[in-house]
Each structure stands twice: as C-alpha cells, then as structure tokens.
Image: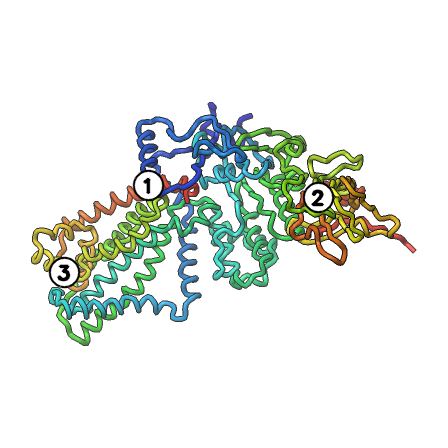
C-alpha cells in the first residue's frame, strides 16, 4: 500500500532566527559553525519552544514548523488551512525546495511544481509568447513541452491576439490569466498552490479552480492547496491539513477539519469589543458587535449560508439623546468596495428603533439570498443626520462574514457564480 | 521504511558537499538559453544605441589609458602600438570583471524569483557568464577591427603567433574563474552585505595587479622582489597568453598557463560547493 504514496513528510521542522541576521552575528555564526563541525546540535535553538506570536519570544529562534508528519497519496487534493503565521507558506516552501527544513526530511515520487506566485520571472519587455517559454522553463518545463502545450495555454488564457505584444502592454487581468495558464499546464505529478487565486476576478477564479479539479480527477495528479477561502478548499479538497503555530493539529476529511478550524480558539474571531475611546461619543458609544444566528445566539465561526445569514448584534451606550442619531451597518467586500449602508431610520418614521438613554442591544437582521459566496466586511457606522459623522465608514471597526453554500435550492445551481451578489429572482410567465 | 528506494527524491536539511547538482542543472538547460535571450532582448529594447554601447566603453577606456599611462606616465607597451596593447588587455579583462561582478550579486538581484520558485540556482550565474559572452564577442570584434587597422593601414610591427589557438581556452578559463570567484563572493554576500561594496572596488584594484596596462616584463624588471604578486595572479597568464597569441608580445609559458587552469578548477569547484550550500537556505536570510 506504500506504493502509491506521492509525498511523505517525516518529522520536518523549520527554525527561523528572529531579529537582525547578518552583520553583527559573525561571532554567533562562528559559534554555530563550531558546534556543527563537532557534530553537536545548534546551541542557539531551544528545543520545545513553540511558535506563538502573541507571546514575546524568549529565544531568537522560532519554530515556524515543528515535527510535521504526513503522507499524501497520489491523486489526492489536500487543503492546507490555518490562521496567519501557522506555517502554511513555510511548508510549501520546503516542499518546493525553495528552502530546506532544519530537521527531518521529505520524500516523494514524481516531479513537483510549485505555484507560490504567478508570473514569477515574467519580463515586461518580452512578448507573451517569449514569456510563456521563459516562465514555463523556470517552472521546470522543457522547451519542447511548452511548445506542445502552447495552443492550450494561449487558449486557456484567451490572449491569442496579443501573443506577440510585450506583456507590459497587457491589462493586469490578461497578465494574470496568462501566468496561471502556463502554470496550470505543467506536466508535474505534484502541484503546490499558495493562495494564488486571490488575484483575478471571480470568473477567472472559478476557471482556475475548475482546472485544478480536472487536473486531480482526470489526470491523477496530487495537489496541495493553501487558502484562506474555506469555500474553495471545501470544493476542491477531499482531505485537509490544519496547522496552527507550526504544528499539525489535524489531518482528516476536509469538512471535519474546516469545522474544527472555524470553531477553534485560534481562528480569527468574528467579534468586536470596545478597547479604547476611539469610537466613543455621548450620542452613540459602541461597546461590542458580533454575528448572531437566526435564533439570536452568537455565531462564533463567522461562516454562514447564503440563505441563513442571521444578523448583527450591536451593543452601545447612549449618554445624551439626539433626534438626528442614525446608526447601522455598512457592508463591504474584502477589497473595500461598498455594497450598501443601512440605518435604523430607513423605514417609515413610525417603525424606527429609537434607543433610549443607557445601554442598548439591537440586532440588525441581514438579507437572505443576496450575497454570493466569499468573505465580506461588516462595519458599524453612526452619524447625526445632516450634522456630522460619529463613526465614519472609512474608519469604522469591522468583523468578517464568510458566506459558504446555501446559494439555491436549484438542482443545477451548485457552484459559486461570478459576481459579488447572488440573488434568486422570481420569474413569472404572463 | 523498507521500500525507501522507491521514492524518486528527498528533501533533507543537508546535502552531501560533493553533490554538485550538475545533472539537475543539465535538465534545466533550456532555461539557460531563455535567460540569455531575455538578457539580450531586454537590453536592446530599452536603449537607443543598442549594441553601440558595447563599443563605447572599451573605446573610451583605451583612449584614456593611452593618454594617461602611455603618454603621461610613459609605461612601456613592449614595443606594441599603445592603443592595441591596451585594448587587448581591456577586452579580456572586461569579460572577466563582468562575469565576476555580475555573478557576485546573483542572490541579491534574483531574491524575488529565488523566493518563489525552485530551479537549480547554478543556472543563474551560468546564464550571466553566457550573456556576457555576447558582449565580449562584440568587444572582441572591435579589437579585431583595430588590429586590422594597425596591420593594413598603420603597418605597425606585430605578429600573430601559434598561441592564438589557445584563445578559446583562454576565454573559457576567464569565464570560469570569474564565475567561481563570483559564486564564492555571492555566497558570502547573502549574509554579510558589506562584501558587495568591496567587490567593485576590489575588481578595480585587481586590475592593477594584472598586466592590463603594463607588460609583465616591465613589472619584473622594475620590481623584481614584488612581481610575484602579479605572476601568481591567475588572470595574468591569461592576459599574457591573449596578447602573445594576437600581438606576438607577452610572457607565455605552459607552466603559468597550467597554474591558472589548476587554480581555476579549484576556485570553480569551491564556488559551486559553497554556492549550492548557501542556495538551500538563502531565502531565509535575505
């Protein structure tokens, strides 16, 4: 059964040195070198130290990865998830031979291609065609191989007309498409992908995901895919690795790993609490806000379905009444594109919520079946209508909201569609 | 663990020092040519005068050397026409110096691409050496034109000797010596940046310890006790051989030529070993 293992990590660890490296450490380098010559362990690496960025490190060495073990079978698509600084990128860098592990080793079968960035080595002066060959060979393709795949690459990128134009004249979208197309057509047995899909529009992202899926399913290639987008991971990967503070927390079925990650204390918490007087005003003093489910309990994951978004719980103090007080939420995309504002004064005047003096708790119910899959920012905003802002949208505090699934009941609408919104409209025959 | 042999590759903290990764590098040979082509094309596309720049630098240097060292200082040129003597030295020296300085910054210049994708890093310095060969070729053509002028029009007194047949070996040795030294320095500059400043300055100084602006015979004659510095400089026999081959003047001996070849092989091997060692973790320190 060992025979179809594509990649196996045995006890890999990676230590990084904090602070200044280089000048000033010649004496320490000598100390280390002397220890190495005698075959002793690195005197500056304390064993057992865990990478926790919230504590200040006692040593100048931190373990970005610690004793990672896993086996990946051929043809599997594996997701790698974890909070920022968990060691995801370090793992991919080791697997792609960009840097070597401090201890342990990785063995495997077949050619590895890594896609840590797209368009590595693209030269703006060269034409599209020249860059395809250059980028292809940087990624490890022979010239003849690229030549054979040229039509496919050009077709996938949709740049046939501009093939002999220098890429500096390309739009950024064309540039990204071309770069991904080259990488996607690599004939490697193992493909490492790091968050590259964050660039490009939704349509392109869907196309890339589709390509990666077909690569594993039909060609039996192995993929390791790092992403913060649980939607893409859930769609592409059967199994996932959860990393936190350089340690492997879980390696299991993707849905189990994702729910463990989202409910664990180290996932980025979808709630906000007042820490200082930055957003304070006598008319509206924001204390806290977080997401709630439809039964008004706090949603700790920040992940909801498109047809059951729940609401936003807001807690604030009113020390002075003002007739013009407006408060509400602003919804932004991750790229800070405003989708809408909503105030408590949006309805007819007799339906307005009028907060009395003292501490108030309000739930703002979110619309269902409006947002597409993806991550959005919810901000609390407040103003004295026609007088002044209390919390300016640009500076307002935010929490993240991630929509996964629940797009429709239709049997033929299963995947995320392009676009920021995904409403289900009524069709009436007349 | 028993069937470990069935794995194609393994990534480990340390590789054997003797693993020069030459096979790996050979597999990426296409990349070498594409990089050379990239250097060439992007150089042309940004300039108005294009390849003319290759001519201007050696021409101006020759004129200045003729004026300063030849006429003002009156240093002997072994009876050769001064411009011809200097140009021979400059053309050869420039190739070596370019290979050395460009290779020595290879990690810094390519930090971005090295941090994102793996390929045998040796390809980069090799592509630099080959790219510079194009430039050297152009400058060498200029030298041949000046030679032709002195031969046919000025009727100067010089002769081509059999040693001209060593020319290809001289070029290869210059390239490998520059490559080897450059790789040694590049490996050290990843940790200690200040070494990079030393290189441009050091190369200039080294030129004066090489027989670029004076013949070896004059140095031995004037400083019999110190001329060993110049003689042990592995570039000296190369410049001397070059001059002896094309102009018939210069101190060629098989012993010194063999000495240079030996030193070059040692420096090159040391360069590759250290380069490969640094390359594994350099991303962490840049």
Q: Nearer the viewer, residue B21 or A349?
A: A349
**How far from the left and from the top, in percent, is residue B152?**
19, 74
Identify the disc placed on residue A286. Answer: 2
Q: Could you confirm whether marks 3 and 1 are on the same chain?
A: yes
Identify the disc placed on residue A4. Answer: none
**How far from the left and from the top, in percent, is residue A79?**
60, 37
Residue to which mark 1 is pinned: B274
Look at the image and tell me in which quarter the C terminus of chain A lies.
Answer: bottom right
**How far from the left and from the top, in percent, is residue B69?**
17, 66
Q: In the rendered view, would you say A226 is above or below B30?
A: above
Secondary structure type for disc 3? loop
Residue to which mark 3 is pinned: B215
Secondary structure type for disc 2? strand
Q: Compute the Cα span from label 3 to label 1.
A: 35 Å
Q: In the displayed structure, does residue A109 sit left or right of residue B191?
A: right
Considering every residue shown, the one lying at the far front of the view is A320
Q: Compute the Cα span from label 2 to label 1.
A: 60 Å
Q: Could you confirm whether marks 2 and 1 are on the same chain?
A: no
């Amino acid at each position: 059964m060992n025979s179809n293992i594509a990649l196996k990590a045995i006890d890999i660890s990676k230590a990084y040195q904090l602070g200044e490296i280089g000048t000033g450490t010649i004496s320490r380098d000598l100390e280390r070198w002397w220890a190495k010559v005698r075959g002793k362990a690195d005197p500056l690496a304390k064993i057992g130290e865990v990478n926790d960025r919230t504590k200040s490190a006692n040593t100048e060495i931190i373990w970005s990865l610690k004793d990672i073990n896993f086996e990946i079978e051929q043809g599997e698509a594996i997701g790698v998830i974890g909070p920022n600084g968990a060691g995801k990128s370090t793992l991919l860098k080791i697997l792609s031979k960009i840097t070597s592990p401090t201890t342990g080793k990785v063995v495997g079968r077949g050619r590895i291609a890594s896609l840590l960035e797209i368009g590595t080595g693209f030269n703006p002066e060269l034409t599209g065609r020249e860059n395809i060959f250059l980028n292809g060979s940087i990624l490890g393709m022979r010239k003849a191989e690229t030549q054979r795949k040229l039509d496919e690459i050009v077709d996938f990128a949709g740049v046939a007309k501009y093939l002999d134009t220098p890429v500096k004249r390309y739009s950024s979208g064309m540039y990204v498409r071309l770069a991904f197309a080259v990488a996607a057509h690599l004939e490697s047995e193992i493909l490492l992908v790091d968050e590259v899909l964050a660039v490009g529009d939704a349509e392109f992202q869907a196309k890339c995901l589709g390509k990666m899926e077909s690569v594993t399913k039909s060609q039996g290639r192995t993929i390791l895919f790092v992403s913060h987008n649980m939607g893409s991971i859930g769609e592409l990967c059967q199994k996932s690795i959860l990393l936190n503070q350089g340690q492997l927390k879980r390696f299991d079925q993707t849905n189990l790993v994702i729910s463990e990650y989202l409910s664990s204390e180290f996932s980025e918490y979808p709630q906000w609490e007042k820490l200082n007087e930055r957003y304070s005003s006598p008319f509206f003093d924001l204390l806290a806000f977080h997401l709630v489910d439809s039964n008004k309990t706090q949603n700790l994951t920040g992940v909801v379905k498109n047809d059951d978004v729940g609401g936003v719980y807001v807690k604030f103090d009113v020390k002075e009444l003002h007739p013009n007080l407006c408060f509400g939420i602003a919804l932004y995309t991750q790229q800070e594109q405003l989708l809408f504002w909503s105030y408590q004064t949006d309805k007819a005047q007799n339906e307005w919520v009028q907060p009395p003096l003292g501490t108030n708790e309000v739930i703002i119910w979110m619309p269902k079946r409006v947002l597409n899959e993806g991550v959005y920012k919810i901000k609390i905003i407040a103003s004295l209508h026609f007088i002044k802002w209390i919390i300016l949208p640009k500076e307002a505090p935010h929490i993240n909201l991630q929509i996964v699934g629940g797009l429709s009941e239709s049997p033929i609408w299963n995947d995320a569609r392009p676009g920021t919104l995904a409403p289900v409209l009524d069709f009436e025959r007349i | 663990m028993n069937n470990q042999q069935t794995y194609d590759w393994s990534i480990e903290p340390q590789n054997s020092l003797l693993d020069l990764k030459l096979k790996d590098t050979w597999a990426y040979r296409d990349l070498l040519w594409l990089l050379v082509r990239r250097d060439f094309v992007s150089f042309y596309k940004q300039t108005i005068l294009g390849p003319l720049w290759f001519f201007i630098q050696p021409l101006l240097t020759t004129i200045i050397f003729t004026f300063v060292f030849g006429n003002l200082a009156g240093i002997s040129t072994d009876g050769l026409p001064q411009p011809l003597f200097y140009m021979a030295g400059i053309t050869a020296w420039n190739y070596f110096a370019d290979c050395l300085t460009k290779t020595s910054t290879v990690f810094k210049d390519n930090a971005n691409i090295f941090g994102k994708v793996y390929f045998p890093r040796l390809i980069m310095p090799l592509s630099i050496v080959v790219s510079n060969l194009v430039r050297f070729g152009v400058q060498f053509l200029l030298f041949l034109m000046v030679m032709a002028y002195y031969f046919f029009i000025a009727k100067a007194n010089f002769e081509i000797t059999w040693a001209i047949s060593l020319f290809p070996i001289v070029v290869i040795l210059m390239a490998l010596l520059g490559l080897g030294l450059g790789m040694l320095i590049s490996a050290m500059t990843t940790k200690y940046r200040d070494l990079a400043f030393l290189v441009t300055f050091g190369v200039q100084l080294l030129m004066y310890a090489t027989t670029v602006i004076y013949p070896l015979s004059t140095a031995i004659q004037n400083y019999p006790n110190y001329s060993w510095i110049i003689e042990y400089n592995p570039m000296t026999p190369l410049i001397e051989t070059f001059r002896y081959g094309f102009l018939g003047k210069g101190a060629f001996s098989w012993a010194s030529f063999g000495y240079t070849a030996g030193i070059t092989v040692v420096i090159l091997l040391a360069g590759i070993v250290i380069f490969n060692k640094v390359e594994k973790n350099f991303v962490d320190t840049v």
